[in-house]
Image (cartoon, rainbow, N blue to C red):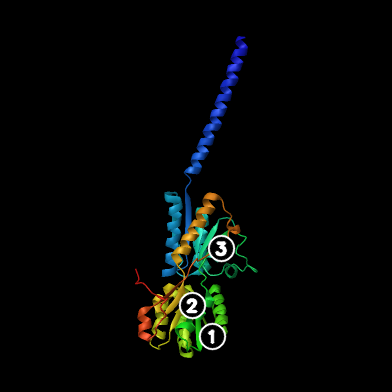
Amino acid sequence: MNKVFKRALALGLSAVLTAGCFAGCSAQSGGDDANKTYKVGICQIREHEALDAATEGFKKAMTDKLGDKVTFDEQNAQGETTACSTIVNQFISQGVDLILANATPVVQSAVAATKDIPIVGTSVTEYGVALDISDFSGKTGMNVTGTSDLAPLKDQAAMIKEICPDTKTVGIVYCSAEPNSKYQATEVSKYLAEIGITAKEYPFADSNDLQSIATQAVAENDAIYLPTDNTVAENTSIIDSIARPAKKPVFAGEEGILRGCGVATLTISYYDIGYKAGEMAAQILTEGANPGEMEIAYAPQFTKKYNADICAELGIEVPADYVALEAAQ
């Protein structure tokens, strides 16, 4: 009986210790999940108002969702595509949990560099064009999702006719290195043709030849249209110095370009699409959402805005439903 009792006692203690070990391990695992932190690499193609707002919106959404459990490594490529690749590869070496790719060239560089780390894009007009996906249906099918800054291009074309009804010709100025700028130029040209306006495209290679191209476009057309082009956005002063003295109105694809040289725009909120991108990123990190199966998100609303100073100087009156551009912060 004594031997049986001792054996039973030993088995009982073994079971208790084993259960305790599993319970302890389980509790520790749960604690690790609860205390998990995330590192997010942010690469922005260049500094300008729209992209800055998208980045701020992204960071705000991430901190709203994750609090102090998320940290950011924020880098700017200063307009250099090669720098995008360098920055993204640094993120990969650091083992970041997710990459925010702010603008088309960054998305392209990130997708080329990694098939494993989730990528969330923002300020990208058309993902099918950016990623060379034929018959794009709204999901990339790869490790990338995000938000689009696509504005209603048909309505932007109509805006030109609405504000300057005598316009016969429009020059569309954009950087040829940005595929989504070419996409917008083609679409706006089509919509302008539908309302009896002839459009001509004026692509430029980089900021070094923008002045000569803009001078030609202004001289040859009644008005200028600028898509959501990052190189244009960073160099609006060049276009303004040519178009305004010539009394030629410039219609902008977004608010930042409007502030620099335009008379009017039908714009989205870049802060809002950045914030939505942050929500999507949080869903990927905390809920295990698959980026390739997440629909690209678009801006929910658009606002008609005008630049009161430039409109006054050019003698342009805008309809009552346009909102005056706020002063720069």
Location of the N terminus by quadrant is top right
Q: Earlier in the sequence, mark 1 or mark 3?
A: 1
Q: What's under tag 1, amino acid-wise? A: Lys
Task: Tell whether label 3 touches label 2 (CB within 8 Å).
Answer: no
Q: Secondary structure at mark 3?
A: loop
Residue placed furthest toward the top: 1
Q: In the rendered view, does 257 fall on the left or right side of 132?
A: left
Question: In the rendered view of the protein, which quadrant contains the C terminus?
Answer: bottom left
Query: What residue is disc 2 on?
Result: 206
Q: Which residue is mark 1?
A: 200
Confirm whether residue 309 shows in the render: yes
Point out residue 13 in the picture as x, y percentages from the top left corner: 56, 21
| Residue at the front extreme of this rendering | 320
Of the numbered discs 1 and 2, the one sitting upstream in the chain is: 1
Image height of 197 relative to 236, above or below = below
The total number of labels drawn is 3
Q: Residues within 10 Å of mark 1 (few under 14, many from 20)?
A: some
Q: Nearer the viewer, residue 206 or 158?
A: 158
Q: Which label number is shown at residue 296?
A: 3
